[in-house]
Image: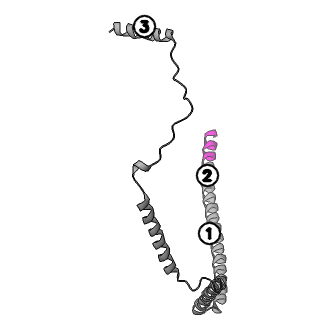
Amino acid sequence: LPHAAALQALKRKKRYEKQLAQIDGTLSTIEFQREALENANTNTEVLKNMGYAAKAMKAAHDNMDIDKVDELMQDIADQQELAEEISTAISKPVGFGEEFDEDELMAELEELEQEELDKNLLEISGPETVPLPNVPSITLPSKPTKKKEEEEDDMKELENWAGSM
């Protein structure tokens, strides 16, 4: 009998495990469906709002014509150009300097510079006329002399070195 009860308990456990697996699968399916429904609702709201935005943009652009916009931008550019011309005209000194042509003045300046350069080149003379610096009038310090002992030490080192060869 204990053996039969244990067998019965084992069968019940297997049934419960099977039921648990089915319930778990059902819950997973329901959760996936809920998520899909939420995504669908979100997509619906997004599309609805995109539609509102498109209508609003269309209404805003209904009053605009691209040719009129181009025309307006050209008018603005023309007015800016006119303002620049007026500003340039106002800033010119009146009655002074207008009778001279800028290109003629530049040509004359270059001609004068060339004449000056030619004159300077002709005045350059040979090396015999180049002034030399003056001889210093002060006495220069003399080279310090080595002490007699140092010279003797140096000679001994040199002799030792020569003898070792």
The quarter of the picture where the N terminus appears is top right
- Residue, disc 1: 36
* SS assignment at label 2: helix
Sequence-wise first label, 3 or 2:
2
How many other residues sit within 10 Å of disc 2, few (<14), some (14-19) or many (≥20)?
few
Overall secondary structure of the magenta stretch?
Answer: helix
Q: Residue at x 42, y 65 (%)?
A: 118
Residues drawn in magenta: 2-12
Sequence-wise first label, 2 or 1:
2
The amino acid type, in three-letter code, at marker 3 is Lys
Quarter of the view holding residue 86? bottom right
Q: Residue at x 60, y 89 (%)?
A: 78
How many other residues sit within 10 Å of disc 1, few (<14), some (14-19) or many (≥20)?
few
- Residue, disc 3: 156
Quarter of the view holding residue 35? bottom right
| Mark 3 or mark 2, whichever is nearer to me | 3
Query: Measured along the vertical axis of the image, is residue 15 above or below residue 77?
Result: above
* SS assignment at label 3: helix
